[in-house]
């Protein structure tokens, strides 16, 4: 799927309008101008899109195309208020919330998990928490567009006519940009242990205007099956979307899109899930445990009922014709 020839020019023009008003709060609203949004109405369209992004791109699936990129911690700590005289929102202190959850998780995890990270391996602890449903600052991504597509479509959109989405980000650009913005932290070491230690040091510092890639030393079967890793913003107060915009603006805007979004209509959900099932991409393969297998069976049942609904069976006239033919053939025709 070709990139529009004027994409870069339009983005630069929009960024100039933002810079012309330095007092304007950035917020999440401008983010759509930084994302190349496309549509896939057929399986082949999705294949072409994913093939174009093979290599340096990574992916994330979300049930609703209208959702932006928000880690579970940001969603869980959001407080919305409304009174007679005012309304608005704010977040609970994310750092103290994380410390409390981490402490409680460490206290109990050994009762349920045989192999645990070392105490100083913060990235692995947060990764375990994320995969067991505890809100963290991590955002799940995968190196597979097909895995991301499954997660986008596993649950149906809430309203008829809406779309799901597969997000894509150029990981090579993200790493390169991070090294530009954090030259003191840039490292080309090949030793995984040294790299993991550097990532853990970064996670302790929450005031850097960068999104970093996190591949914990202590992974689990789910991460391996899902080809998964995490992205994490290093400023707690800013949203993930704001951080991406900041990285795309300073010092210059990119010449090509580095964040893309592919929207998939809900009417294609069952057909695409069947295609993925043929590729052995389903809940049981991505979550290799009993819960994953049971969810796989339930989703198979949903697909089966949707397929049955597409076959209305014989019409009234067909039944009437069959009855007439049987009467004409006589009682011994069977």
Image: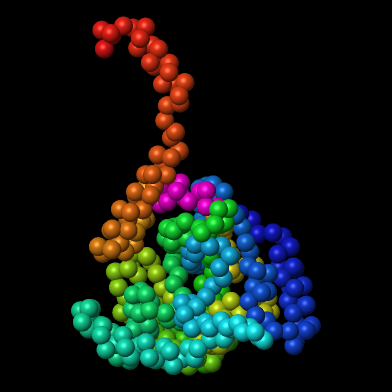
Q: Quadrant of the C terminus?
A: top left
Work out whether residue 271 can be spotted: yes
Query: Measuring 52% from the left and 75% from the top, which residue is drawn there?
Result: 70
Work out whether residue 180 can be spotted: no
| Residue 268 inside the magenta-drawn segment | yes
How many labels sit on residues? Answer: 0
Q: Quadrant of residue 128?
A: bottom left
Q: Farthest residue in the front direction?
A: 84
Image coordinates for residue 306, horizontal then vertical, percent = 42, 44
Query: Measuring 60% from the left and 82% from the top, which residue is drawn there?
Result: 82
Q: Quadrant of residue 204?
A: bottom left
Image coordinates for residue 163, horizontal then vertical, percent = 56, 57
Residue 22 located left or right of residue 88: right
Vertical arrangement, residue 267 with respect to residue 176, above or below: above
Residue 24 located left or right of residue 288: right
Image coordinates for residue 252, horizontal then vertical, percent = 68, 79
The residue lying toward the viewer, choosing from 223 and 315, is: 315
Vertical arrangement, residue 153 with respect to residue 99, above or below: above
Vertical arrangement, residue 201 with respect to residue 9, above or below: below
Query: Measuring 43% from the left and 40% from the top, which residue is drawn there?
Result: 309
Image coordinates for residue 187, horizontal then vertical, percent = 46, 86
Query: Measuring 43% from the left and 18% from the top, which residue is drawn there?
Result: 320
Instruction: Specify how the rendered protein is coloured.
Output: rainbow
The residue lying toward the viewer, choosing from 331 and 212, is: 331
| Residue 185 inside the magenta-drawn segment | no
Q: Quadrant of the N terminus?
A: bottom right
The residue lying toward the viewer, choosing from 80 and 106, is: 80
From which residue to which does the magenta span run?
265-277
- Magenta stretch secondary structure, dominant: helix
């Amino acid at each position: 799927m070709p990139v529009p020839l004027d994409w870069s020019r339009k983005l630069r023009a929009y960024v100039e309008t933002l810079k012309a008003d330095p007092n304007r709060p950035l917020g999440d609203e401008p983010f759509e101008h930084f994302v190349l949004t496309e549509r896939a109405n057929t399986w082949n369209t999705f294949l072409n899109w994913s093939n174009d992004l093979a290599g340096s791109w990574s992916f994330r699936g979300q049930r609703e195309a209208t959702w932006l990129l928000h880690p579970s911690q940001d969603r869980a700590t959001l407080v919305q208020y409304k009174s007679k005289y005012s309304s608005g929102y704010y977040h609970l202190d994310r750092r103290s919330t994380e410390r409390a959850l981490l402490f409680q998780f460490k206290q109990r995890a050994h009762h349920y998990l045989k192999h645990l990270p070392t105490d100083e391996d913060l990235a692995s602890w947060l990764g375990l928490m994320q995969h067991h449903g505890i809100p963290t600052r991590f955002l799940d991504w995968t190196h597979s567009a097909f895995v991301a597509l499954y997660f986008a479509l596993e649950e149906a959109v809430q309203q008829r006519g809406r779309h799901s989405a597969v997000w894509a980000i150029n990981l090579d650009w993200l790493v390169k940009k991070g090294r530009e913005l954090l030259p003191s932290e840039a490292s080309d070491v090949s030793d995984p242990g040294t790299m993991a230690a550097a990532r853990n040091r970064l996670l302790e510092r929450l005031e850097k205007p960068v999104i970093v890639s996190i591949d914990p030393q202590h992974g689990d079967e789910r991460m391996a099956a899902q080809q998964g890793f995490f992205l994490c913003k290093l400023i707690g107060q800013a949203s993930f979307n704001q951080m991406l915009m900041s990285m795309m603006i300073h010092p210059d805007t990119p010449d090509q899109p580095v964040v893309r979004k592919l929207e998939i209509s809900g009417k294609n959900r069952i057909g695409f899930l069947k295609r993925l099932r043929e590729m052995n991409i389903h809940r049981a393969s991505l979550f290799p445990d009993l819960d994953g297998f049971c969810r796989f069976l339930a989703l198979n049942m949903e697909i089966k009922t949707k397929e049955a609904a597409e076959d209305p069976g014989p019409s009234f006239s067909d039944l009437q014709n069959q009855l007439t033919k049987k009467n004409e053939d006589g009682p011994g025709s069977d």
